[in-house]
Every structure is written in C-alpha cells, then in structure tokens.
Image (cartoon, rainbow, N blue to C red):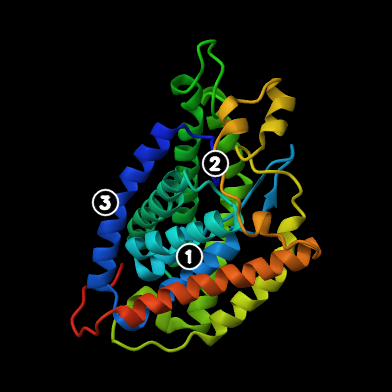
C-alpha cells in the first residue's frame, strides 16, 4: 500500500500533504491534552509494532504482495490521534531511510495508513464494542474494525492511483505517472485487501490485543489512560524482539506489491514506461529495500528492523522528555 515516488503527480502529492496538515495538528493537540507524558513512549512502541508489521510481506497468487499495518490496534490502545502520529512516524522512517514509500507521496501514504485506517477502524471498533458482549466481544470488534480500516485505506490508495491517467498525461494521452485507471486500480487493490491482506491485519490486531490483555493488562484502554505512571512493558519488548528475528519471513514473498513496480516492470505489462516514472525525482535512500550492501538479505532485513524499531522508540521517548509534566488530562479512549 506504500505509494512509491512518481506514481502520483505533483498536484495530487501537494493536495494529500495539505490534507494531512490539519490532521497532524489536531492529533498533536489531542495527544498533548489527553495522553500523559509518561504514556508518550508507548506511542513509540506502537509505531515500532506498525513498522515491523509492514515488513512481513504476505504473498498473493499472481505475484503481488501486501502487509498488515496495525493502525487500528494502536487506536484501540491509545486513541486514533495517537495512532495517526505513531504510524506517521513509522512511515516517515520507512520513506527517508529505506525508500519504502515515496517522500513526495508521504502525505498520501499517511492519509491512507495513518489517518483513514486508524480512524475508520477505531470508529467501527467503538461502535461494535458497545454491541458485542462477553469476553470475546472486544476481539470481534477489534477484528472487524481492523478489517474495515485497512480496506478503507486500500480503497483510498486505489482511487489515488486510478485517477492519475485522467489528470496526468501527455498531449498524446499517454499517462505520465501511474498508468492504471480506476477500472484496474480498484479491483487490483481491493482483491488482495478484501482477502489475504485484510485477514493478515485482523490476525495481527487480534493476536496482539489478546497478548496485551494477558501480559500487560495495564495497557488496555480502560487502564492505560489513567494515572501518570506506566509499567515498563517488558513482555511487549520481548515480543517485539521475537518479531524482529522473524522478519526475514517477509522475504519469502518474492513479488512486488501492486502499484509499487518500477518503470521496467510496468513496461513489460503495458508496453511503455510513463515519463515521470523514468525521469522523476527520487531520494537515494541510505538502506534501500531494507538491505545492507554485502550482507545476506535476511541479515540486512533484521538489522533494518532493529534500526527502524529503535528510531520509533527513541523519537517518542525524546518527545516525552521535552514535554512538561501535567496532572490533568482528558478521558481515556472507549
């Protein structure tokens, strides 16, 4: 679902980035108001779990791949505004350091995965959590919410891809950016997310929520937003370490996610390469595709996961240290 560089034209990138500015401002204000300083580092933990989730590529017949995001899970635990900031930071690290998602498309990627996904997923979860009874009710609500959330995000990405041939083309009508119209982009994106990738999001969300309920119940929404101290979630860090060791499983999916192909790959399908995909600007990432020169792919993948997770946690820890202590804060998420 990461939109690469040059798949969207400049106007689309600008509009999507501008749309995210008020979202980020609102999220920052809400988190400052409602989340105690002691709980801010938990956003880093949430961002780390999202970062790792996106490294586990799941294959789909036909050669394409996809992944979970974990945005609804973070929203359930800390609120959708906190989830927006956590996923935004994870996406920023991926774009700048690993070349996963375009820098110019950062606003669009955040709109889809850091805004639409957690806010829609959380809204569905909140509604169903009040309807479902029993111990399993929360998990049913979380599973359905996460499924709806990731599919809503995928649909938005499909539309952003699909409108490009209509708004960005040369005098001959040849697309300059993404060459696939809505009639192709929507079915292609939704087929995977309504099935395999949506299931991956559900499993990741429900499994982690159950793990947290069993090992770190103080992080559940009814507990985590009260008080001004927080226990160090040691078992969560241990799980994070296990997932980091397992990330090479994401390399088993050898295909490329739909909409993330290079110009040469597109040319083999369409017979031509859009001009902006060939000549457009692209950041030379320090560790492209989560690789370290000279090291086996699996080792590079693990080291990349370690770096990404560490940066997520460090960034929010530094933010917490820069904040003033407060004794009054808002209510906890539902």
Say whether disc 2 or disc 1 marks the residue closer to the N-terminus.
2
Contact between labelled residues 1 and 3, with CB atoms less than 8 Å apart: no
Question: Which badge, 3 or 2, comes first in the chain's sequence?
Answer: 2
**Tag 1 secondary structure:** helix
**In which quadrant will I find the N terminus?**
top right
The label number, if any, that marks residue 22 in the structure image: 3
Residue receiving disc 1: 139
Q: Residues within 10 Å of mark 3 (few under 14, many from 20)?
A: few
Q: Name the residue under label 2.
A: 5
Q: Residues within 10 Å of mark 2 (few under 14, many from 20)?
A: many
SS of the residue under disc 2: loop
Residue at image location 60% in from the left, 37% down from the top: 259
The reply to whether callout 2 and callout 1 are in contact (CB within 8 Å) is: no
* Residue in the foreground of this view, choosing between 80 and 294: 294
Which dot, 3 or 2, sits closer to the camera? 2
Could you give the CA–CA distance between mark 3 and mark 2, rounded to whole angstroms? Answer: 23 Å
Q: Which secondary structure lies at badge 3?
A: helix
The C terminus, quarter of image: bottom left
The one of 143 and 112 positioned closer to us in this rendering = 112
Q: Quadrant of residue 264?
A: top right
> Mark 3 and 2 residues: CB-CB less than 8 Å, in contact?
no
**Residue drawn at 35 percent across, 82 percent down:** 321
Q: Where residue 143 sits: x, y (%)?
A: 50, 58
Q: Quadrant of residue 88?
A: bottom left
The structure residue drawn at horizontal position 54% and vertical position 24%, both measured from the top left corner, is: 176
């Amino acid at each position: 679902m990461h939109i690469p560089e040059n798949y969207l034209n400049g106007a689309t990138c600008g509009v999507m980035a501008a749309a995210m500015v008020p979202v980020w401002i609102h999220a920052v204000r809400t988190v400052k108001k409602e989340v105690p300083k002691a709980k801010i580092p938990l956003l880093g933990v949430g961002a780390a779990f999202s970062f790792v989730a996106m490294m586990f590529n799941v294959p789909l017949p036909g050669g394409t791949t996809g992944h979970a995001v974990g945005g609804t899970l973070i929203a359930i635990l800390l609120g959708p505004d906190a989830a927006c900031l956590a996923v935004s930071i994870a996406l920023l690290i991926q774009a700048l350091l690993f070349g996963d998602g375009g820098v110019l498309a950062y606003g669009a990627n955040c709109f889809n995965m850091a805004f639409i996904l957690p806010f829609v997923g959380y809204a569905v979860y909140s509604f169903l959590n009040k309807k479902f009874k029993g111990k399993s009710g929360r998990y049913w609500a979380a599973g359905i919410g996460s499924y709806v959330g990731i599919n809503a995000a995928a649909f938005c990405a499909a539309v952003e891809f699909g409108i490009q041939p209509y708004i960005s083309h040369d005098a001959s009508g040849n697309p300059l950016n993404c060459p696939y119209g809505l009639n192709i982009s929507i079915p292609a994106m939704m087929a995977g997310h309504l099935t395999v990738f949506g299931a991956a999001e559900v499993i990741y969300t429900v499994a982690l929520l159950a793990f947290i309920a069993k090992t770190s119940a103080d992080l559940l929404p009814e507990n985590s937003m009260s008080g001004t101290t927080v226990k160090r979630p040691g078992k969560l860090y241990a799980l994070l370490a296990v997932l980091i060791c397992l990330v090479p499983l994401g390399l088993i999916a050898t295909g490329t996610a739909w909409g993330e192909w290079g110009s040469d790959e597109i040319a083999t399908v369409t017979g031509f390469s859009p001009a902006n995909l060939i000549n457009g600007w692209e950041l030379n990432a320090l560790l492209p595709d989560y690789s370290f020169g000279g090291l086996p792919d699996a080792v590079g993948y693990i080291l990349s996961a370690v770096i990404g997770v560490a940066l997520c946690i460090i960034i929010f820890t530094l933010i917490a240290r820069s904040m003033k202590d407060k004794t009054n804060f808002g209510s906890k998420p539902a």
